[in-house]
Image (cartoon, rainbow, N blue to C red):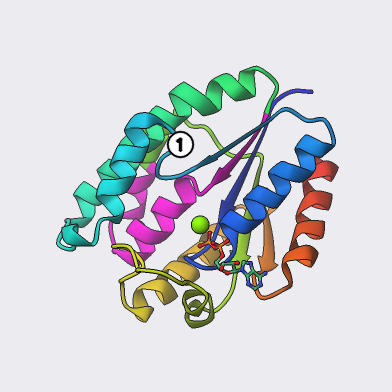
Amino acid sequence: MKGFFVVFEGIDGAGKTTQARLLAQALVQRGHPVVLTREPGGTPVGEKIRSLLLDPVLAGLTPLAEALLYAGARAELVASTIRPALAGGRVVISDRFVDSSLAYQGYGRCLDLKELEQLNALATGGLVPDLTVLLDMPAAEALARLTGRADRIEQERLDFFDRVRWGYRQLVKRAPQRYLVLDGRLGCRELHRQILKAVEERF
Ligand SMILES: Nc1ncnc2c1ncn2[C@@H]1O[C@H](COP(=O)(O)OP(=O)(O)O)[C@@H](O)[C@H]1O
Ligand SMILES: [Mg+2]
């Protein structure tokens, strides 16, 4: 089998990490070689950039610098992990990818979408996921699920996450065939069932 690239997207608390793990487990059980990764992070450099980006102390980070840091971590992840894994025929599952930057830095922080797309095309060499699962739900409900200390992004106001959610939905409209959009309020098991079915259909 040739490599297959699945990405989970959605606002904080929508269930991405939960579903990425469940999908990885199910595919491993079925004998597929799986690489599970996350953004920002997934590499030694990326995890250092992640801790910068999520540090509440850096509350005043400017949007452009933020976008560049995400893109830097992404460039490293694509070159060192994702591309080699896909070339080796593996299934790569990533908890967030380029659409997170378009939704958060574009729609959330109001940076120019075209410029963000150019920056990210440079960072990824134009790599596009085979399937993106968008877990969509109202921001207030998703944020209410989060426990523990809020990171720098999670500390944003509700209207920020409303814009991000709306942004994701705009991204889907541009290329609906690349997405599986599911209601994040469904039960974990039901979401997992639908995601696994969609992935297996596309293999
Ligand atoms: N479908 C679901 N229904 C109810 N709660 C969920 C569901 N999926 C995840 N959760 C819970 O919501 C919280 C956030 O889930 P998580 O997967 O970490 O979201 P994300 O990675 O998108 O921020 C966790 O406590 C998780 O157990
Ligand atoms: Mg998560």
* Residue at (47% x, 29% y) in the render: 78
44 sits to left or right of 138: left
Q: How many marks?
A: 1
Q: Which residues are magenta?
A: 91-117
- Coordinates of residue 30 in the picture (x, y in percent): 85, 36
What residue did someone put label 1 on?
42
Secondary element at image label 1: loop
Q: Amino acid at mark 1?
A: Gly
Residue 135 coordinates in the image, percent (x, y): 61, 64
Q: Which residue is depicted at the point 79% across and 50% down?
A: 196
Is 131 left or right of 148, judged from the image as shown?
right
Res. 37 in view: yes
Does the numbered disc 1 mark a residue whose Cβ is under 8 Å from ligand 2?
no
The question of residue 97 being in magenta is answered with: yes
Q: Is residue 119 visible?
A: no
Give the vertical position of 195 relative to 148 (above or below). Answer: above
Where does the image place residue 195, in percent across and percent down from the top left? 76, 54
Pick the front one: 120 or 151: 151
Taking the spot 36% from the left edge, 36% from the top edge, the residue there is 46
Residue occupying the point 72% across, 73% down = 186
Q: Is residue 145 left or right of residue 66?
A: right
The crowding category of the residue bearing disc 1, from other C-alpha atoms within 10 Å (few below 14, some 14 to 19, many at least 20), is many
The vertical placement of 197 against 120, above or below, is: below
x and y percentages locating residue 17 in the rendered image:
57, 55
Left or right: 51, with 5 as reference point: left
Q: Look at the image and tell me in which quarter the N terminus lies.
A: top right
